[in-house]
Amino acid sequence: MANTTRIRIAIVGLGFGEDFVPLYLKHPDVEYVAICDMNEARVAAVGDKFGITRRYTRFEDIIASDEYDAVHILTPVSLHAEHVCAALAAGKHCACAVPMATSIEDIERIIAAQRQAGKNYMMMETSVYTREFLYVKQLRDEGHLGPITFLRGTHIQNLEGYPIYWQGYPPMHYITHALSPLLALAGTNASKVYCLGSGELRPDLRKQYTNPYPIETALFRLQDTQLAAEVTMSFFQMARSYIESFAVYGEQQGFEWEQLENEGPALFTMQPVRPGHHGRVTTATRVHMPDAAEQLPREIARFTQLVPYDESDAQRSFRVGGGHGGAHPYLVHEFVRSIVEGRAPAVDARTAANWTAPGICAHASALRDGELVVIPEFS
């Protein structure tokens, strides 16, 4: 596809997917946007809200049409592999919400489908585009952290009352928000894992997945390093407010995500050795996360914050943007530009597989009471 080409995209799944509609509509490299959802009333509401005339209630009609170059899939997790493979087989570039899949077999199916189609696949992992991640990545790149010595990720969220397909969901099968920033900062993959389940999932929540644990915590060895990374996941029966977070510790500086809303992340700095004193002093500072929106086209840069969609139109002055720490515009821009530039996206099929498979293996370890599981590497 030539660099001057503007792409035509369909967004499939308008629950979470509605958040991405304004970003594609405003992106300078997008020609037009279609929307699709099984719920006809939702399609009508979102279409009317944003003035979209291309509306569908069947995924099959989207991929059968030659009017679209790409699809962004935001359907339930159990449908990701099926929908991605179908879109790729139909010759569409494909972005998909996390996780890539919930089995190693489906991961391999997607990789094979992408290679055969020769089209782009991108897992839309928000955690590697948050303000916090971009800030820590810059610290790492500029050498402020020093050699990294340990990493930790956490995702705690109560899913009771969510759609039925979430009830009893194995926590580690949704690991990517907690693990991806750790692997990205360490610049490597996870090679093996020990994982323990904790607590007893209520009987009424076990029916769908036969998962016995409300909480799972894992220790990963990172490939070709002496680094360990710890990840804790919970979706039920844990009295803690919602948090998706990471922490990274180096020999010179360490970073911890804020633990309570609005208190700010903490930056730890190791001070030089002081003669005559035992131990080195570490100072702690609350830090404000800068916005790196200057990296984005001006048409969508403002959507890293919650802002009016169109201040010039009273009918469309509702507020949009700011999703997942400002990550959504970066995801859309990376996916779109990868297509326009004819290159692989940052979180391509191989990367997505190496960020997803560790969670599948961790859950398998938990079911075996912490038995070591070797994680396959995808190349």
Image (tube, helix red, strand yellow):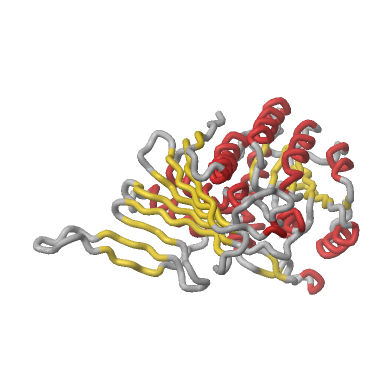
Q: Is residue 243 above or below residue 168?
A: below
Decide which of 193, 280 is in the foreground and name it. 193
Q: How many marks?
A: 0
> Viewed as shown, does residue 51 lie left or right of 79?
right
Any part of residue 248 in sight: yes
Identify the residue shown where x is 60% and y is 54%: 213
Q: Quadrant for the N terminus, please.
A: top right
Figure quadrant of residue 293: bottom right
> Viewed as shown, does residue 294 lie left or right of 219?
right
Residue 236: % across, % down: 62, 61
> Viewed as shown, does residue 80 lie left or right of 197?
right
Decide which of 20, 257 is in the foreground and name it. 257
Any part of residue 190 in sight: no
Identify the residue shown where x is 48% and y is 38%: 372
Q: Quadrant for the C terminus, please.
A: top right
Residue 222: % across, % down: 43, 39
Q: Is residue 335 above or below residue 35?
A: above
Identify the residue shown where x is 40% and y is 34%: 224
